Amino acid sequence: MGGNETRLVEDIYMIGVRGMENLDVFVDFAKNMMKQDVVIAPWLTWGDGQNRIPTHLQRDIEGIAERFAHLHWRPDWRITLTGSYPISRNRVAEAYRETVSSTAVYLSHLELGQLNVTEEMVKVAERLTENFVAQTDPKVFVTFYLLTVIYEDLQALEYYGSMQANDFVRGHLHRPWGTETLSGELEAAVSAEAVEVDTAADLVRLTSRGKEMLHYIEGIFRESGFFTSRSKLIRLNNFNHVDDIASMMEALVPTACEHRKTVVELSGIQPGMAVLELGSGTGALTFEAGLFQRVGPDGRLVATDPSTSMLASVRRKRESYNAHWVEVVHGKAERLPFPANTFDSVIGYAFLHLTDMDEALREIARVLKPGGSLITLHPLHFPARNEFFLEWFAPLLKTGGTPRNQDNLPGPDTVPSAMEPHYEIVHLQSLDLEMHYTSPRTVVEFFVGIVDVFEEQMATLPWRARHDMVQQLIKRGEEVCRKYPPESLVEMHPGQFIRAIVRK
Ligand SMILES: C[S@@+](CC[C@H](N)C(=O)[O-])C[C@H]1O[C@@H](n2cnc3c(N)ncnc32)[C@H](O)[C@@H]1O
């Protein structure tokens, strides 16, 4: 190996293969990190290719990262996984910078329901990262960060088969935020024999050793739940980009309003009750479906959603319906800003499948009064694919090898068994939705871009390919919609209605 520091540092590539025995260390590390709301996801910070953090806050984060690197990095600091490799100070600072940045973006989504990062969120991200690093081995931290970097590099090469060396170092297909380090990474990947360069064609390719490394890292990410949490972040991020989920749903499910009214009718909610609506979106259940009238001015109705832009629309509706008893509160199902035993009923239309279900069900049980009820209508797995669907979504269904779960929606037993520890189900019925596949852009943006029902397939795609896949599917959808008569582009999507009483 060359003597210069960058080259040596990049020797991190030498881990993998012989480092299998270390898998548990990283799996535990990742689980712990996610539990503490610390996030390593540079793509979240960069969104569509531009840093979302205002320049003055980026400077603050640089300072924080330098301070952390100063505290933790030592000149003799080496990664000792399958050998002993020095780590440069710059790489350590970079790991901290990307972690504090993506944690700040994540917190802004989570706590504020917005894309803008505030100074306060940077401070919280700094504190969370600092606490977390204090409890772990900083070397494991930096190594894990480097694993995420290597993963994105190798995954892109596997997906594209080969790449022009120039494309690789510009990173525009897989890591546009990595331009400063990508050429070093390529050099290192070549020295580690993970990647080979066809000098005549100037093409870069993955070797069999590179594939083994990639699968080793994938194993860590899958086993620790890192992939699942990445998909959750993608969804959180997507919802905050949509102002009007209701009109998208209207195009997909034109009878959604009737459907919501049925849910209100079956809810058992009575005037004067204290009711919490979760995942209210723009307030279609509360207002258009008449929940606010059912609860009435003697009751209390709180509409919540993690997305602030949607809540702005709920507030506007509250004015126009003159419904002063409706409160609008920012919140997500897994962490509700209410004391225990507050509500007679908690209700939600098409939200439960988007949550961490066990956490959400526990939290809902906490805020329900004894004898209180949870009412949910959620979609279930896609029905058996019909011809038009298979033709339309073929490129996505083919990715990720053999399709395991075709989608990430619940099965018929998923919600009932998750409810078992806390609730008694008193009413369960199928309530199917008539889904129209006649607006290709809305269909694709909703299922793939927002709800991310094909998360398993999408998670295997590099950064740019995720975006390209959406565009490709929209185009295919337009062709499919021209080819098939509109009446054949309708399918009944299974839905499950549940009313359950909390056990307290
Ligand atoms: C498919 S939309 C349904 C919106 C609304 N209930 C309706 O009937 O139009 C799902 C909603 O769930 C919200 N959501 C996403 N993740 C959530 C979570 N973890 N907890 C609560 N709501 C969530 C989204 O922001 C979005 O508004």
Image (cartoon, rainbow, N blue to C red):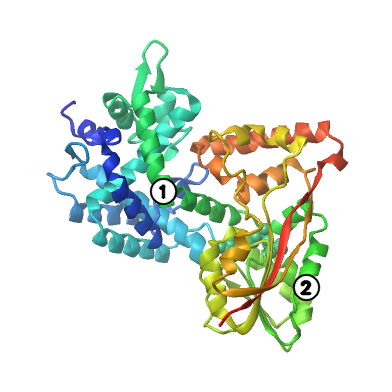
Residue 23 to residue 37: above or below: above
What residue is drawn where x is 49% and y is 41%?
49
Residue matched to label 1 = 223
Residue matched to label 2 = 266
Give, as a three-letter code, the residue at label 2.
Leu
Residue 492 visible from this viewpoint: yes
What residue is drawn where x is 43% and y is 37%?
175
Q: Residue furthest left?
A: 76
Q: Tag 1, which secondary structure?
A: helix
Residue 373 to residue 437: above or below: below
What's the distance in space between the residues labelled 1 and 2, CA to CA? 40 Å
What residue is drawn where x is 56% and y is 79%?
367
- For ligand 1, the image quadrant comes to bottom right
| Crowd band around label 1 with a 10 angstrom C-alpha radius: few (<14), some (14–19), many (20+) | some
Q: Is residue 287 left or right of residue 119?
A: right
Give, as a three-letter code, the residue at label 1.
Glu
